[in-house]
Image (cartoon, grey):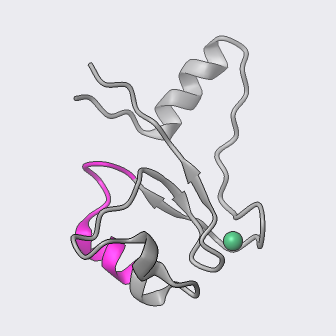
Amino acid sequence: MKFYPLEHLCKILDKYGISYKKRERCYKCSDVLFQAIPGITIKEEIITFAQNAKFNATEKIPEEAWMHPGMHCPNCGFTIFHSYKID
Ligand SMILES: [Zn+2]
């Protein structure tokens, strides 16, 4: 399995004239989003996110501290899912 950072994927899209701007802030409440990247984001970061989240993060984040790859809002729980190509 190969993972590409979002910045790399944006460059590929740029090449084809498709613009995709990485969201830094939540669509709903404009709080700063937390980015969960497979192989980069560590368990401790996910646990810290869950502990500081203003919504009920225990429903969303299981005990093993796994998060779906993407951007997660610590305030309202809004999520932008990212998918990655599997080789
Ligand atoms: Zn939000």
Residue located 58% across and 88% down the image: 54
Is residue 19 one of those drawn in magenta?
Answer: no
Residue 65, located in which quarter of the rendered image? Answer: bottom left
Q: Name the quadrant of the N terminus.
A: top left
Residue 74 spot, x, y in % from top left: 56, 77
Q: Indicate whether residue 39 is drawn in magenta.
A: yes
Q: Residue at x 36, y 82 (%)?
A: 48
Place of residue 40 in the rendered image (x, y in percent of width and height, measured from the top left)? 29, 53
Q: Position of residue 16 (x, y in %)?
A: 66, 11
Figure quadrant of the C terminus = top left
Side of 22 where 46 appears, left or right: left
Magenta stretch?
37-49
Left-right relation of 76 to 59: right
Above or below, comparing residue 80 to residue 56 in the picture: above
For the point 32% across and 59% down, which residue is it?
41
> Quadrant of residue 55 in the image?
bottom right
- Measured along the vertical axis of the image, is residue 17 above or below residue 25? above
Splitting the image into four quadrants, where does ligand 1 fall?
Answer: bottom right
Tell me which corner region of the image, top left, top right, bottom left or bottom right, holds residue 17: top right
> Which residue is depicted at the point 38% across and 25% down?
85
